[in-house]
Image (spheres, rainbow, N blue to C red):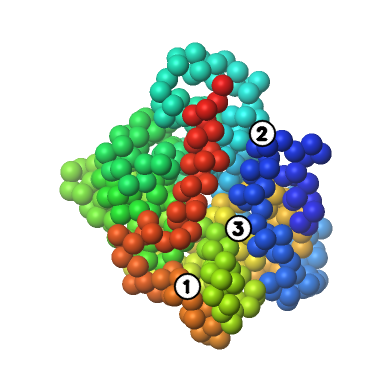
Amino acid sequence: MFLRAFKWVLPMKPNPKTAIFISVILTPGLLKYNYLFEQTSSEKPCPSEQLHQENAVHHNYLSWIIHNTKTKIWHDSADPSEIDQGLARGIVGVTTNPFLSNLAVSKNRERWAAEINAVLAQNLPEEQKAEALVRIPVTCAAKKLLPVFERTGGVMGQVCAQVNPARAGDRESMLAMARRFHSWAPNIAVKLPATWAGMDVLEDCIAEGITITSTVNFTVPQVLAVGERCRKGVLRARARGIEPGKCFAVIMIGRLDDYLRDVAHDWQAGVSESDIRQAGLAVVKRANRLFQERKYEAVLLIAAQRGDYHLTEIAGGDFVVSLTPPFQEMFVNGQFAHEERIDREVPAGVIERLSQLPEFVRAYEPDGMQPREFITYGVAQKTMAQFAEAGWRLLENLR
């Protein structure tokens, strides 16, 4: 299954942009995805599952998730042909970031030649040029998802557009950018970073009726803060007679695992690779329980998978999971048990061993961090730098 996914990513003659994509997305955690839950990867389907799998169109694992559980599947790519394939499979939303927007613009220079050339001809300042270029793939995707948005009454069908990652602490710039992005299409979800400044802007946007996706989240305290600030925004909007914006709270599940793996190796901690691969799962499961208990208006959005277990072990959760095309392909063609596992606890021994790492405790405990600390969490800085340097900056320099 991995080889099939890998072939999708790596063409016969990779170019520099492809190399960046591989370095950002294909981490060691993904390269070894088969090894976490042996019972999952080696499990043979029961007879009833074999009957289901005979009809690959309707009863592959991805289709089972979409049609038989509360879990909604979004598409993690800005490329129009890939979005078309995702829609055919049943996806109901699209996540993009500056890296994915740049990848789509570079891949579709001929398709969008008129729009791209019109932007370049204006000789805009670099930041404005990047924003104008981001608009091209995002609005294309928004048009494709508009029927889903209308059919679901605006519950699903959103397309994410991320603000300049270099502005993560700049409230005024992010709010102005969010208002502009919101005007592009009725189903835009503006992506804001989960920094203290980002939380302030998030609340203001929800209060104005702007839908937000809070990104660069890796931890329970971050998404709880999103839930609380979203609720405040909703109350403000209703007090003014305004329909509040929707809110999605991303958990970058695989990036947390990657970070904790580095920390564990550096500290020479007594934590196994199997433990590390359950860290993100533990965070998602705990966050999900707390969101259900507190009945937040915000919806969790799980992204940045590194292996099949980042879907199979949380299947059934009442949230969104965004999948790249290679992972969609894996879940269409692979054999996985049709089981809801969101309520299966991560073993206490795993949590105990992971808790040797203060960075895991900060991620797992509801009070592990205060909002002012969010921007200092190690993987947050790494992720924002990647989005800036391998995405936004490349759009600024497009010629």
Q: Can I make out residue 328 in this image?
A: no
For residue 42, above or below residue 184: below
- Percent position of residue 121, x then y: 49, 13
Question: Element at badge 3?
Answer: loop
- Percent position of residue 171, x then y: 28, 43
The residue to which callout 2 is attached is: 81
What is the tally of numbered marks visible in this picture?
3
Q: Residue at x 55, y 41 (%)?
A: 390
C-alpha distance separating marks 3 and 2: 22 Å
C-alpha distance separating marks 2 and 1: 38 Å
For residue 152, above or below residue 393: below
The type of residue carrying mark 1 is Phe
For residue 46, above or below residue 180: below
Q: Earlier in the sequence, mark 2 or mark 1?
A: 2
Of the pair 148 and 115, the residue shown nearer to us: 115
Question: Element at badge 2?
Answer: helix
Q: Earlier in the sequence, mark 3 or mark 1?
A: 3
Q: Residue at x 48, y 47 (%)?
A: 385
- Quadrant of res 298: bottom left
Q: Nearer the viewer, mark 3 or mark 1?
A: 1
The residue to which callout 3 is attached is: 305
The type of residue carrying mark 3 is Gln
The type of residue carrying mark 2 is Ser
Question: Element at badge 1?
Answer: helix
C-alpha distance separating marks 3 and 1: 18 Å
Q: Are marks 3 and 2 in contact (CB under 8 Å)?
A: no
In this view, which residue lies farthest toward the left?
239
Q: Residues within 10 Å of mark 2 (few under 14, many from 20)?
A: few
Q: Earlier in the sequence, mark 3 or mark 2?
A: 2
The residue to which callout 1 is attached is: 360
Q: Can I make out residue 162 in this image?
A: yes
